[in-house]
Amino acid sequence: MIRNFLALGEAELIDRCIGSKIWVIMKGDKELVGTLRGFDVYVNMVLEDVTELYISQILLPLALCCCT
């Protein structure tokens, strides 16, 4: 299944995800999980039933310290 997605262009891949639940990682400390309803040529997305998640800025340095 992953190989099929690699052959698709970005727009076609996003188009196939319409109606599916997606996880969007924003710049900064915000993530969104919701149902994709549509998008435009600039990849502005319309999401429904969105949950906004915040990444703790305190946990990130601790995780980096533990991994090194």
Image: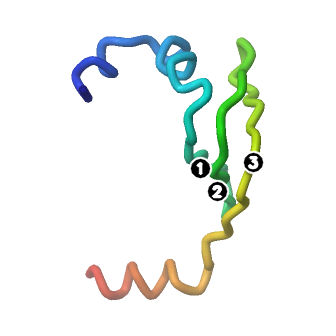
Residue annotated with mark 3? 49
Please state which amino acid type lies under the numbered disc 1: Ile
Residue 25 - label? 1
Q: The N terminus is located in which quarter?
A: top left
Name the spot of residue 67 as percent of width and height, x first.
28, 80
Residue 54 - label? none
CA separation in Å, label 2 and label 3: 14 Å
Name the spot of residue 38 as percent of width and height, x first.
72, 22
CA separation in Å, label 2 and label 1: 5 Å
Residue 45, image quadrant: top right
Which residue appears at 55% of the width and 22% of the height?
Answer: 14
Which residue appears at 49% of the width and 18% of the height?
Answer: 10
Label 2: how many Cα within 10 Å (few below 14, some 14–19, many 20+): some
- Judging depth in this view, the residue of 47 and 11 nearest the camera is 47
Please state which amino acid type lies under the numbered disc 3: Asp
- Judging depth in this view, the residue of 44 and 28 nearest the camera is 44
Residue annotated with mark 2? 31
Q: The C terminus is located in which quarter?
A: bottom left
In-image side of 44 versus 3 (left or right): right
Please state which amino acid type lies under the numbered disc 2: Glu
CA separation in Å, label 3 and label 1: 16 Å
